[in-house]
Amino acid sequence: MPKTPRKHISQPRSLTGLAITGVVIAGLGVAGCGSSGTSSSSSTAPASTAAITKAEFLTKANAICAKGDQKIQAAQQAFGKKQPSLKQIAASEVPNIQAEIDGIRALGTPSGDAAKVATMIATAQTDLNKVKGDPSLLTRKTSAFVGFANVAHPYGLTACAPTA
């Protein structure tokens, strides 16, 4: 969860938490199931990315999410006192989440954790896809990415998704 207070209109605030969670989840999903087009049908780890330690992965992934959260907060502030539509919220949040996913994907998968990372990635991508189909999920009290948070937080990826 971000450490800065969020005193924004209700839709963007909820959207921010969900967007961050979605980006992290999707990012992990991409990291675990991305491929450079090599043979093998296994989708648990990118074929072209060098190995990374769990500590490095967590440090870098949490930093990606923190930076992404700053961008999401800036997008919310750009709305000012206007109440944005769901379409405007999604248009400002989804690209930021996708950027986080892409950044995390580029990190690679820690050795021995391919299954855990693949689960996080699959959960994140599924949640993000749901948000893309129904942006109102970003305005609900419960995060659209709570499933991801339940998997990612115990692993140590805590900056990417709210738990509620």
Image (tube, rainbow, N blue to C red):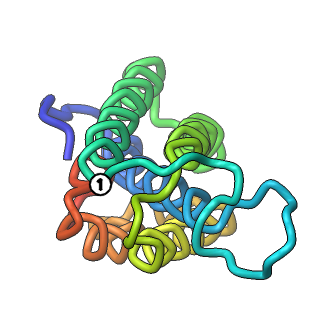
Report which residue position mark 1 lands on.
54
Horizontal placement of 98 versus 14: left or right?
Answer: right
Residue at the location (44% across, 69% down)? 117
- Toward the viewer: 23 or 92? 23
Q: Position of residue 33 (x, y in %)?
A: 64, 68
- Toward the viewer: 19 or 121? 121
Residue at the location (61% across, 43% down)? 102
Q: Position of residue 81 (x, y in %)?
A: 37, 23
Q: Position of residue 145 (x, y in %)?
A: 39, 67
Q: Is residue 85 visible?
A: no
Q: Position of residue 147 (x, y in %)?
A: 35, 77
The quadrant holding residue 155 is bottom left
Residue at the location (59% across, 66% down)? 45
In this rendering, is residue 117 above or below 1? below
Which image quarter holds the C terminus? bottom left
Q: Is residue 84 visible?
A: yes
- Toward the viewer: 135 or 160? 160
Residue at the location (61% across, 59% down)? 30
In this rendering, is residue 7 above or below 140? above
Q: Amino acid at mark 1?
A: Lys
Give the class, few, some or many, for how many residues have Cα within 10 Å of label 1's Cα (few <14, many ≥20).
some
In this rendering, is residue 53 above or below 39? above
Helix, strand or loop at mark 1: helix
Q: How many marks on residues?
A: 1
The quadrant holding residue 29 is bottom right
Horizontal placement of 147 versus 96: left or right?
Answer: left
